[in-house]
Image (cartoon, rainbow, N blue to C red):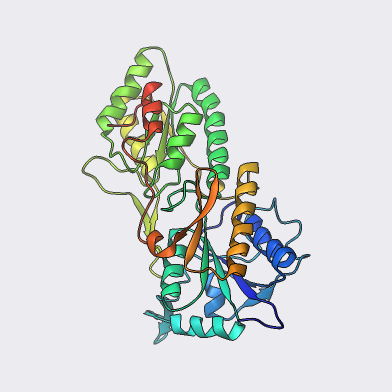
Amino acid sequence: MLRNGRRRIGVLTGGGDCPGLNAVIRGVAKASMSLYNMEVLGIEDGYEGLIERRVMPLDWEKVSGILTQGGTILGTSNRANPFRWPVKKDGEEVEFADVSDQVVEYVEELGLDTLVCIGGDGTMAIARQLSQKGVHIVGVPKTIDNDIWGTDITFGFDSALQTATEAIDKIHTTAMSHHRVMVVEVMGRYAGWLALESGIAGGGDVILIPEIPYRIEKVCEYVAQRSQRGRRFSIVVVAEGARPEGGDLVVQRVVKDSTDPIRLGGIGHVVARQIEEATGLETRVTVLGHLQRGGTPSAFDRILSTRFGVKAAELCFDGVGGVMVAVKGNEIVTVPLSDVGGKTRRVDPNHPLLAVARGVGTCLGD
């Protein structure tokens, strides 16, 4: 659809925030305006803005100066799912309704030729469903977990990796001073990339990831042996989605009206208690939590986000939809949204980084 001879596109950011979101928005908007003379509308608070009809025009001034800012100028939501939208009935009771047809109608009313959806696996799953209902969509993969299928890396991961590594570096010094076992819990629900890479980079003695169920006896034995050899401290890096062999994930709470209702958290405290009880070694826990999502994007993420944004603008101008931009090697490519949804990029049992970790004596709990 051309309005006054120009294409019009929309941009939204969905799911949890992470460094690099504003860099993508900037890349999409500036390339759309400078290269392709397209109009750009920002959708406020992810899919919630489409449901509640909240948008803002994006001009050159509005997206200037945001490259280095964390978060997202558009706002985001991890509870807004057009196919499962919470509606209050009879006072307090909440029911879920499919309002996706209203969203499709609003996209048509806005005159959007393409909708750019920036987000993680949940955002991409919804994008795929809307694409099947006729909405022209280009996805941009974002997650600090680095677990979106179809791309070698997502923006946001490198920044979170830097934050986690710096935290482990700092914890190292206090662990050495007090002769303690320090457990560092990082994000990573179903994929252990962040724990694995920050653990290697930070010199973690034990790394526990979702892909390798651990035996706590093995972990305790390893930590005790280090102490007996005169290494009177240990660093244990554990992903929030790690679980013991034959055991379950540690769930912190359930948010019923969220697109991803399960909130993990607490595995670090479980592991720390078990280590202290079994070894007698004083053990402390640090949960990095949302620190990993905040702050300015790394140089790598600024560049990757900008590349993603410029490519997304090109696809919008060319009328390409139903795809997600991705990295393969050093090239920006596209993969079908239909291939992305419902899949998770996890650490393969034969991944070279696991061999690297084992090679320097790291315990993986198996």
Can you name the residue that lies furthest to the front here? 318
Can you name the residue that lies furthest to the left here? 246
Please indicate, yes or no, whether residue 23 appears anywhere in the rendered image: yes
Q: Is residue 100 above or below residue 220?
A: below
Q: In this view, does 289 lie to the left or right of 206?
A: right
Can you name the residue that lies furthest to the top here? 229
The x and y percentages for residue 352 are 39, 32
Please indicate, yes or no, whether residue 361 appears anywhere in the rendered image: no
The x and y percentages for residue 155 are 55, 50
Residue closest to the eye, 2 or 11: 2
Q: In this view, does 15 lie above or below 288?
A: below
User: Which quarter of the rendering shows the C terminus?
Assistant: top left
Residue closest to the eye, 172 or 211: 211
Q: Is residue 36 left or right of residue 285?
A: right
- Which image quadrant is residue 244 in? top left
The x and y percentages for residue 364 are 33, 31
Residue occupying the point 46% across, 50% down: 151
Residue occupying the point 50% across, 21% down: 176
Q: Is residue 122 above or below residue 275?
A: below
Q: Is residue 360 above or below residue 252?
A: above
Residue occupying the point 40% across, 81% down: 98
Q: In this view, does 162 lie to the left or right of 218?
A: right
The x and y percentages for residue 261 are 38, 63
Residue occupying the point 59% across, 62% down: 312
User: Which quarter of the rendering shows the N terminus?
Assistant: bottom right
- Number of marks: 0
